[in-house]
Image (cartoon, rainbow, N blue to C red):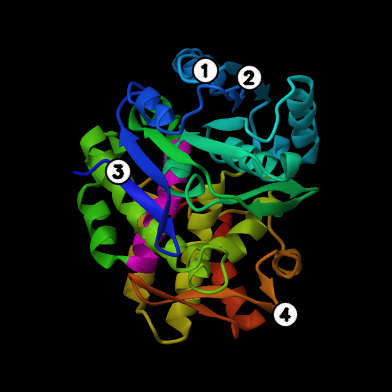
Amino acid sequence: MENRLTVCRDNVPIYDIVLETSFEGLKEEVDKLALKERRICIVTDSNVAPLYLEEVKAILDTCCKYVSVYTFPAGEEHKNLDTVRGLYEHLILEHFDRKDVLAALGGGVVGDLCGFSAATYLRGIDFIQIPTTLLSQVDSSIGGKTGVDFDAYKNMVGAFHMPKLVYSNLATLLTLREEQFSSGMGEVIKHGLIKNKAYYEWMKEHREGILARDLDLCRTMVYESNVIKKNVVELDPTEQGERALLNFGHTLGHAVEKLKDFSMLHGHCVGMGCVAAARISQLRGMISEETVQDIRDTFLSFGLPVATEGLNWQEVLLTTKSDKKMDSGSIKFVLLREAGDAFVDRTVSEEEMKAGFDLITFGGKKEA
């Protein structure tokens, strides 16, 4: 299995995605960026810092002129402009200039916040991604979408800003809590459903090994998901068309996430959104009821909830209309022609959305 992908824009190489099972190769990859005379600030959170900060800082100390650290409290509730402000102040006090670099060490919250800060500090400085969760390794670290939440509106403030390197140490998956691993599987399963049915079937066949976090299987899985995301991003770097397919499950998923006050993990909400979108696809006559059940069972089998309770339909509908994925007043929904073949639709009715919603709130149960 290869361990490197190169992401291009207009056929020009922009950055590499490197998959390893330790941090040993990080020095060689960072040295290629010629940072010897530059400062670097490691941005991380209170969960990741005790695990990996010391090791990564020691490596970067050999690659850069000066290494600084900014740590903020873990959790989606801290992915906001207040935390960004704190990072700006830290960088100013440390005299970071336009030639200096940020390094995101952590999961999706760290990567999104660090990337947004890099995009906006001094009108843009370089940054690298060192993702440590499954969700960030397969999804959020790739493609240059950065952002923070504004009040209760997810990723409402953001920018497109490509990293200079994505270095994924797959061994970090071994320290993830089960719910964090299953959250990442929400995005992995999504990738198969939108672009590669064979990959989707492969996941189901290798479920036990994946859940046991066999690193060879995890490398194959992360690599295949990276290929899917890389190909979509290269076709549509700023989400004008094709890239919207990556939002499968996100329309209702983001609404659930917000109305649950971010108490549910992102990948779990996306999984429920995928089940709801599958139901709408079935109502359109594109996939069978058996396929919907198979999709639902697949999420369940990887430890994801497929339903929740305590949500009001009118609040969910209102929230979807406030989402950043709105397009000229219409809600963009990603549907399935079949497993592995998704498309963007702007004609989903409120009644169809309600039918999808009903499936993920059926009986208030958390599993079938």
How far apart marks 4 and 2 lie (CA) works out to 42 Å
Please tell me which of labels 4 and 1 falls first in the chain. Answer: 1
Tell me which segment is drawn in magenta: 179-195
Q: Secondary structure at mark 1?
A: helix
Q: Which residue is mark 4?
A: 328
Task: Give the quarter of the image for residue 194.
Answer: bottom left
Task: Give the label on residue 4, or none.
Answer: 3
- The amino acid sitting under disc 2 is Val
Residue 80 shows in the view: no
- The amino acid sitting under disc 3 is Arg
How far apart marks 3 and 2 lie (CA) works out to 28 Å
Residue 149 lies in the magenta-colored region: no
Confirm or deny contact between disc 1 and disc 2 (CB under 8 A): yes
Q: Which residue is mark 1?
A: 53
How far apart marks 4 and 1 lie (CA) works out to 44 Å
Above or below — where is 63 with respect to 75?
above
Please tell me which of labels 4 and 2 falls first in the chain. Answer: 2
How far apart marks 3 and 1 lie (CA) works out to 24 Å
Q: Secondary structure at mark 3?
A: strand
Image location of residue 119, percent across then percent down: 67, 45
Task: Give the label on residue 69, or none.
Answer: 2
Residue 180 lies in the magenta-colored region: yes
Above or below — where is 137 with respect to 55?
below
